[in-house]
Image: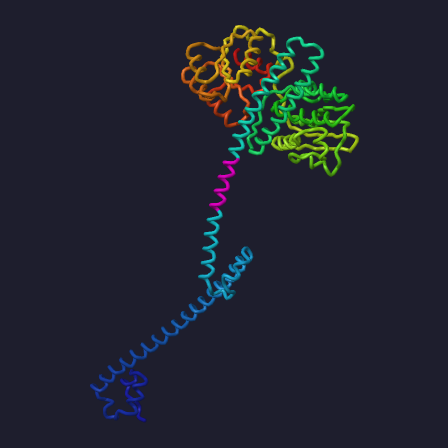
């Protein structure tokens, strides 16, 4: 085959082959033919370029397609595995759910429907719980109201009993009568202790206990506890002693009422279960850091003791170590429960060490801050009989025998006392007279003490108002405090406490 001219060598290779094979040589040198072939060669080049582009694009698309397929396959596997795990988790929480869907991992809609049912049931349960909570709160409020009313109803006659016993002891009774009066006093105080136990337990259960932080004389407090229990100890033939470490600080900060309650309860229990034995109240200084002293309180007795298996049982509410104890010794089974709960609130614990037939030892520690009071500044008894002479006091009390009792007390102190029977009359009397103090009963007909106090405060912000109440409800105290009430005297009225309160507030 002849050699193609140079001008043909620039043409597309495929076209060169076709020219060499099919185009006679006489046309190879023809300029017009070669120009035409040059145009055809351009089309050949264009087609080849487009083909390469198409093939390249197809290769890229195929690669991307495979990547997408791989990604979808991977994600489907993850979804499948997740579905299986979700079903397994649901079946663990709700075994009956297994029948709601199969184990293929494909039925997403069934799982979603089942979860929606669970959510609806959960919402229904939430509503039931809210309703139950509301019902429980209403029941708790009703219980609190009931206890408050019953407290008032029980304390009202008890106030008269204890008050008149106190008045009789002030009128030089015969020795035999003194014995009877002492027995009546002990019985009345035991009944009051039972009432206080029930009310305190209710307040502790509701978390409504608030601890005071006032100056306490530990020596006087312990001696007062001893004196309060001495008559009962003497009746049982017990020796009641106090032992106090000299290093124990005398004046500390704390809640004197609650500490007295705890010690009184432990001491009275020890005496109750000890006949012709010994009961000891002991205080020891365990450690001291700065202004704080860790004090160990021990109540020891030589009584009947408690078996090891019953030593924790006695702290359960309404529970005694043995059934015969309630019959023989009495008691509500609440005292030690209250002590345990009070000490827990004070970040302490009650411990017991006892041997049946040999006695028991109850102990607890309290971290108390030393008071700034020094012995020369210690408060002394302020009952002199003269401090209230001539004071004008309005007594607001609807129960006649309670009013008579209070008037007797006020007469002994040479007070100028006026008595009205309801809050409305108290408001009118205060508007028309100047009083040094008002003794305001809480629960009265026509107008109660809280309403009356509120009305009086609208036109007289200075007069001393002391609430006389059988209720220890925090809500009631908050209402009175918001009115600027000067103080509270709880029923049954303690004559000495009422006297001291009047003197302190009217100075």
Q: Is residue 400 visible?
A: yes
Residue 158: % across, % down: 59, 20
Residue 216 colored in magenta in the image: no
Q: How is the image coloured?
A: rainbow
Residue 400: % across, % down: 53, 16
Which residue appears at 65% of the width and 15% of the height?
Answer: 375
For the N terminus, the quadrant is bottom left
Residue 272: % across, % down: 72, 26
Left or right: 279 as drawn, with respect to 11: right
Majority SS type along the magenta span: helix
Residue 156: % across, % down: 56, 21
- Magenta range is 126-139
Q: Is residue 486 visible?
A: no
Please, is residue 164 above or below residue 23 in the view? above
Which residue appears at 58% of the width and 28% of the height?
Answer: 199
Left or right: 39 as drawn, with respect to 476: left
Which residue appears at 48% of the width and 45% of the height?
Answer: 128
Residue extending furthest left? 32
Left or right: 468 as drawn, with respect to 9: right
């Amino acid at each position: 085959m002849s050699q193609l001219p140079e001008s043909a060598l620039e043409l597309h290779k495929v076209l060169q082959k076709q020219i060499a094979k099919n185009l006679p040589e006489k046309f190879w040198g023809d300029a017009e033919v070669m120009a035409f072939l040059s145009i055809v060669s351009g089309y050949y080049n264009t087609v080849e370029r487009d083909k390469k582009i198409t093939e390249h694009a197809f290769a890229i698309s195929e690669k991307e397609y495979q990547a997408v397929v791989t990604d979808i396959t991977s994600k489907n596997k993850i979804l499948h595995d997740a579905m299986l795990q979700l079903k397994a988790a649901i079946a663990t929480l709700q075994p009956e759910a297994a029948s709601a869907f199969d184990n293929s991992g494909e039925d997403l809609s069934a799982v979603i429907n089942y979860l929606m049912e669970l959510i609806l049931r959960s919402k229904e349960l939430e509503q039931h719980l809210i309703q139950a909570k509301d019902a429980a709160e209403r029941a708790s409020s009703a219980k609190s109201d009931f206890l408050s009313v019953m407290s008032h109803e029980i304390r009202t006659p008890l106030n008269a009993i204890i008050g008149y016993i106190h008045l009789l002891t002030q009128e030089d009774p015969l020795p035999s009568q003194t014995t009877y009066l002492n027995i009546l006093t002990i019985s009345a105080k035991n009944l009051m202790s039972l009432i206080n136990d029930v009310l305190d337990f209710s307040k502790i259960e509701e978390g409504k206990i608030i601890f005071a932080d006032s100056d306490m004389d530990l020596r006087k407090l312990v001696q007062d506890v001893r004196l309060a229990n001495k008559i009962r100890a003497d009746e049982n033939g017990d020796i009641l002693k106090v032992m106090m470490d000299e290093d124990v600080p005398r004046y500390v900060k704390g809640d004197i009422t609650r500490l007295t309650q705890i010690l009184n309860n432990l001491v009275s229990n020890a005496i109750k279960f000890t006949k012709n034995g010994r009961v000891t109240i002991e205080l020891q200084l365990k450690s001291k850091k700065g202004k704080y002293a860790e004090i160990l309180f021990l109540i020891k007795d030589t009584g009947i003791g408690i078996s090891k298996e019953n030593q924790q049982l006695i702290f359960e509410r309404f529970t005694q170590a043995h059934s015969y104890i309630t019959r023989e010794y009495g008691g509500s089974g609440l005292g030690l429960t209250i002590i345990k709960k009070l000490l827990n609130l004070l970040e302490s614990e009650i411990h017991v060490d006892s041997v049946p037939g040999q006695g028991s030892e109850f102990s607890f520690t309290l971290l108390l801050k030393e008071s700034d009071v020094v012995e020369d500044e210690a408060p002394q008894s302020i009952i002199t009989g003269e401090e209230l002479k001539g004071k004008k006091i309005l007594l607001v009390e609807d129960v006649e025998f309670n009013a008579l009792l209070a008037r007797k007390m006020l007469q002994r102190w040479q007070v100028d006392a006026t008595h009205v029977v309801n809050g409305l009359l108290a408001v009118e009397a205060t508007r028309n007279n100047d009083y040094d103090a008002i003794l305001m009963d809480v629960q009265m007909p026509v107008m109660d003490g809280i309403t009356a106090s509120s009305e009086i405060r609208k036109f007289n912000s200075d007069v001393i108002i002391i609430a006389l109440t059988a209720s220890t409800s925090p809500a009631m105290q908050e209402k009175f405090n918001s009115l600027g009430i000067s103080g509270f005297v709880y029923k049954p009225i303690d004559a000495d406490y009422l006297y001291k309160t009047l003197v302190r507030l009217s100075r």
